[in-house]
Image (cartoon, rainbow, N blue to C red):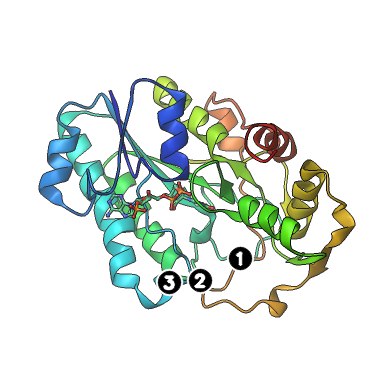
Amino acid sequence: MIVVPGGRGQLGSDLAAASPEVRALSSAELDVTDPAAVAEAVVAADAVINCAAYTAVDAAETDEDRAFQVNAVGPGLLAAACAERGVPFVHVSTDYVFAGDANRPYEPTDPTGPKTAYGRTKLAGEERVLAAGGWVVRTAWVYGATGNNFVKTMARLESERDTVSVVDDQRGSPTWSADLAAGLLQLLEIRPAQRLLHATGGGDTTWFGFTRAIFEELGADPARVLPCTTADFPRPAPRPAYSVLSGKAWADAGLTPLPAWRDALARFARLHLR
Ligand SMILES: NC(=O)c1ccc[n+]([C@@H]2O[C@H](COP(=O)([O-])OP(=O)(O)OC[C@H]3O[C@@H](n4cnc5c(N)ncnc54)[C@H](OP(=O)(O)O)[C@@H]3O)[C@@H](O)[C@H]2O)c1
């Protein structure tokens, strides 16, 4: 049995769909900040993949203590409980641990430098997991069938507005949670020596480019998507300008690269957008 805390989120739901061995636990069934509940949850586990997270990037700016509990303390508890029982533990992290000012894809070994409360708390979680011998997989720009995400928001706006303005100066790699789920399950099979890895959809684009592709998938005119800049949309938490994560270490570890982001979007759209 593969226990998945945060099992009702985007990624957790796709892990549950990907394998009958997955036991996806909601936040009500397992609060990862509760040490006794964590200890109990791992007792019968053959492996644990942690999808629980405080993912509200803007809210975390004024709620860092709570974000730290969920993103750092919880993963630390899970990793320690798994280490004690010899249970493999995989944790998911984020491009937000980097400063976002690079001009080539980030390698796992590159220096971190989070600019947001969310990024700081996720980095603290990584440190605890790695210290306990778990795997950390950083990903970015995740969307899926469950919950709200960028793809669903843009699909809704397509039906409501003539034009949509989207930032064209932030670059990253859209990642379908179903593809990432398959990659995490493969990681558990291979159990590579390298403990810190990156996994995103292949290739990269901007939010503007991503939205044009979403419009294409909807059969809408992509010219209705207009480019704008980050300065046009100020947010409480600054967004990284460059979030592209290198998949080299992932491939070198014998893991299958995630499919190209554009192909993934087309497969997602066939199942969930039309
Ligand atoms: N979404 C992205 O673009 C993105 C990008 C990079 C990395 N990531 C990382 O990828 C992972 C999965 O993200 P996701 O998109 O699947 O997130 P998500 O849809 O927001 O799901 C997170 C889940 O964690 C649960 N949770 C929150 N607090 C909890 C607690 N104390 N105990 C147990 N569960 C708790 C939430 O349940 P409730 O709703 O009931 O609170 C929710 O179901 C996270 O580690 C995230 O940091 C995501």
Q: Is residue 237 above or below residue 102?
A: below
Dot 2 surroundings within 10 Å: few (below 14), some, or many (20 or more)?
some
Q: CA distance from mark 3 to mark 2?
A: 14 Å
Q: Nearer the viewer, mark 1 or mark 3?
A: 3
Q: Residue at x 22, y 27 (%)?
A: 45
Label 2 sits on a secondary structure element that is loop
Residue 57 visible, this orientation: yes
Q: Residue at x 51, y 60 (%)?
A: 96
Q: Mark 3 vs mark 2: which is more N-terminal? A: 3
**Quadrant showing the C terminus:** top right
Residue picked out by circle 2 = 115
Residue picked out by circle 1 = 240
Label 3 sits on a secondary structure element that is helix
**Quadrant showing the N terminus:** top left
Where residue 217 appears, as percent x and y from the top left, is: 77, 42
Residue picked out by circle 3 = 59
Dot 3 surroundings within 10 Å: few (below 14), some, or many (20 or more)?
some
Count of numbered tags: 3
